Image (cartoon, coloured by chain):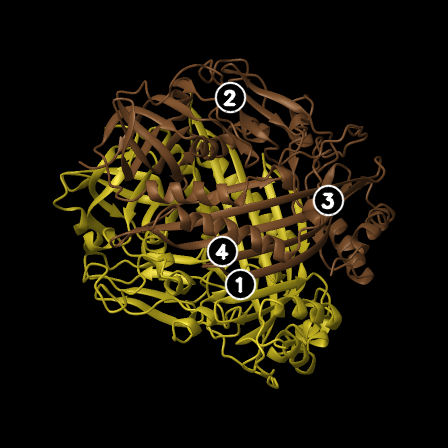
Amino acid sequence: MTGALAAGLPEAVSFFHPQVAEAALMGIGQELRDVLNEETVNRILQEALARGGDAADVFAEQRLRTSIVLDAGKIDSVSYLYPRGAGVRTWRRNQTGFAFSDEISYSSLLDAARVASSVVETSSPAHPIDVSLRNLPPPFTIANPQPGMLEAGKLDILVRMDAAARAADPRIVSVRIEYVDETRDILIGTSDGVYVLDRQYFTSIVCSPAAQANGKRASGLGTLGGRVGAEYFQRVNPTDAANAAALQAVRLLDARPAPAGPMPVVIGPGWGGVLIHESLGHALEADGIRRGTSILAGLAGTRIASPLVRVVDDGRWPNGRGSYTVDDEGTPGQRTVVVEGGVLQSYLVDKQNGFLITQRSTGNGRRMSYRNWPLPRMTNTYIDNGTSDPTSLLSGITKGFYAAELGGGSVETTSGNFNFAVHEGYAIENGKLTDPVRGAVLIGNSLVTMKRIEGIGNDLVVEQTRGMCGKDGQLVPVGVGQPTVRFSTITVGGSTL
Amino acid sequence: MARQNAIDLADKVRVQAERSGAQEAEVYVEQSNTTEVRIRQGQIELLQQSAIAGIGLRVFRDRRMGFLSTTDLRDSVITELVNRTLALTNAATPREENRISESLSVSQSDLEIYDAAVSALRPEDLVAMARAAENSAFAQDKKIQTTRDVRCGASTLDVYFSNTFIPRQTYKASVVWLAATPIATQGTQKREGTYIDRKRFLSDLARPEQIGQLAAARALARLGAGPTPSARVPVIFSADAASTFLQGLFPAFSGLNVIEQRSFLTGKLGQPIASPLVTIFDDGTMRRGLSTRYFDGEGVQTRRTVVVDRGVLRQFLHSGASARRLNTSPTGNGIRSYDTLPVIGPTNFYMDAVSSTHKLIEEVPSGLYVTGLAGFGFDIVSGEYSQQVDGQLIDKGVLGKAVEGVTVGGRLDEMLLGIDGVGRDLEFRNNVSAPTIRFRQLTVGGAA
């Protein structure tokens, strides 16, 4: 395994500008900096505030994404994506003007600034702007970023995963593997004086085998990655993930249909954190709080979950998919305890909504790309460890449902109604896991479901290998996590009564 | 801020790839201009204007395929990217299906996908439309005092395509949309309702007052909702819910998923897979259709495909690559943007209306009328389905109490065969559309 990696150099770093590879933090985004230095950023921000406004920002970005797809045993496609551009935002209270350009030039960004400023019409005089470089400590360092691995090494990982999945069982009829890695350079200048540059790495491998036997079909899922480097692939063997995904598909061939209706439910650790992401996470985001449309608006300081529950949003979790040195509006990523002892402690706050609810940004202002304005978003959100032995959480349940592996979920924050899909489940009978059960959706309500937590395990896992969160058309990678959690009752949406 | 140079550059990039070692090359360029406003309580919350120009290049060498896309149109960058992509292409596996279209005859008739009146909309026009929709929502009922927002936008798109064999092809398209999401409040309960209209032509868009009114009615209908007991009962999906359902079902009709045995419909071609009431089309040539285009993302002329004919599965949908693997013709479903490879996707994919005299709701003694579906409930591989829903109870043929906090579930093959009613109310407000449909029986998961 490590053989393919040994030659890996941070090639992406030297892709266009070899000198950047030698530079330290000051050199990151050098090419962006050539055009958008402190002086030009000051002038663009002044233009953005020429008609007034509370604040403005410039956000420039360039990404290099390598994407490889293996399907039907062959390398299907190999791609490079290189999007590059910058956006300008002006806001005054709840009003936002935003424009971007695919071209990073002083004149195109001055144009963007004029468009952005057109949303406000006040006579307040523009104040001088003087941004200065902030040198922020990264939450963790990556010695050999994965994008730097030579292409041959990346291909080798995929080919060996494909072989491992197919070798796992003769009933595996199809395997698709998608590999993506990315280097994202960002530059942010804000009217409150921040000028910051950052480089973010991201890697994702998704392995989807399908099994077939006796006219039945089932799929498995194995994922790898996070904000990782070559050292990750020395710890984690990709073929193990492929093998496990294949065996999951085979297990599900014989799974019986899921039951429908309310029943005791236990959700397994790690990716089970989709639950907290949907049940409370989105409703804690400051835009819905500011508008008063979130079901959790006005509930700070009140009990919204079982006293056993502590929820953390940690933008500095090591190698987390949602981790960063700095968010997309220039605020350092941070760890925020949002629920403690079941009581709501903090919302997830960006600059503009924070201004409107008079709270400081918690470093949760994120954007999908330079073509989008920032929204308050989660980073890595998890239910913290409890004290129970995970296996003890099954005892006393005569008939219930164990969610071993979840799918996606969604929530409507106005009503608090949420759902999340289970990909692999098990029946609980008399305190023990019995037959595998096919997928079903589970549903709940933000103000009800989290109060029904009866026990929390001590086996916390924060998942870094999967999770793309969509909101308002913007997709960003997020981490979710939890230990094993037991609920007195959740409605299961199976197909049998 | 629009730049015309992406289209000017396209042929140059393709020729450069061919000179650098690509045996075949294809370039796909998109330039779009979009303005969107969002209104809340009469005030502008967001004004966004964007101009996108991006280029996508596929290169082929010895039946190996590589792809690049960028918005950075500087010569030096494109040269570097082309060379690196060609090098990377050597790592791909040769596949017989890796070819490009060799000819393209584009429809000479006007498919009516561009309306100059949409391009001419100014931000203040969009603001006025959004305000009218919001005011109309407020006027419906005192319980509507706020909105999440009302969004109104207009976009125009220029597509450019050429490859080693097919010279320059272009088309221009427009779309305008208006979406209102008022919030109804009763005591501490808040429920939102959304109504969206999207059209190619401004004159086809529903009046803002009507959109506000319909959205308000949806929010109001949800007040007081609660769960209903678990049961196996007849379930009706409203046209909007049925459209969402059909969208979730689409991947089952993808030729690639069928070939790779990732669809529960694998092996069912020519067989009845749904009730005889069900006919499904994919029509990339529908006049004014939201996903109508002259050619798809790989230079294949679009067409009208009968996918399901009175319950019988007639045709899977294909890109060039999946069609070649089955020795059949592509169906013009290679859908892409400049920054993605073509993947099999819907054009205008719809279930046809049935002009029966059946009264779908009136005939149900006891059941559930579903108006909203949420979440990820489709397992296309195994054919299992369950989703969170809301709607209203049906009692003796009449809509009653509002329902939420319940699920519906079933096996997709049984569900499709068990459709016992299809409505007349097909509307095209999305590129995937269906009329009201009634399932004979689904499992509802709710209260004990």
Q: Residue B101: percent from the left, percent from the top?
A: 77, 32
**In the rendered view, would you say B138 is above or below A185?**
above
Q: Residue A350: percent from the left, percent from the top?
A: 45, 69
- SS for callout 2: loop
- SS for callout 1: loop
Q: What is the C-alpha distance between the residues marked 1 and 3?
A: 51 Å
Colour that chain A carries in the picture: yellow
- In this rendering, does residue A230 appear at all? no
Hey, which residue is sitting farthest left in the picture? Answer: A396
Numbered label attached to residue B143? none
The nearer-to-camera label among 4 and 1 is 4
Question: Which amino acid, mark 1?
Answer: Gly
The nearer-to-camera label among 2 and 1 is 2
The nearer-to-camera label among 4 and 2 is 2
Q: What is the C-alpha distance between the residues marked 2 and 3?
A: 31 Å
Q: Does residue A109 appear to the left or right of B245 in the view shown?
A: right
The residue that mark 1 highlights is A229
In the image, what residue occupies the spot 77% across and 28% down?
B109
Say if mark 1 contacts mark 3, CB within 8 Å: no
The residue that mark 2 highlights is B353
Q: Residue A485: percent from the left, percent from the top?
A: 24, 53
**In the rendered view, would you say A408 is above or below B368?**
below
Q: What is the C-alpha distance between the residues marked 2 and 1?
A: 54 Å
The residue that mark 4 highlights is A225
- SS for callout 3: helix
Numbered label attached to residue B116? 3
Say if mark 2 contacts mark 3, CB within 8 Å: no
Image quarter of residue A221: top left
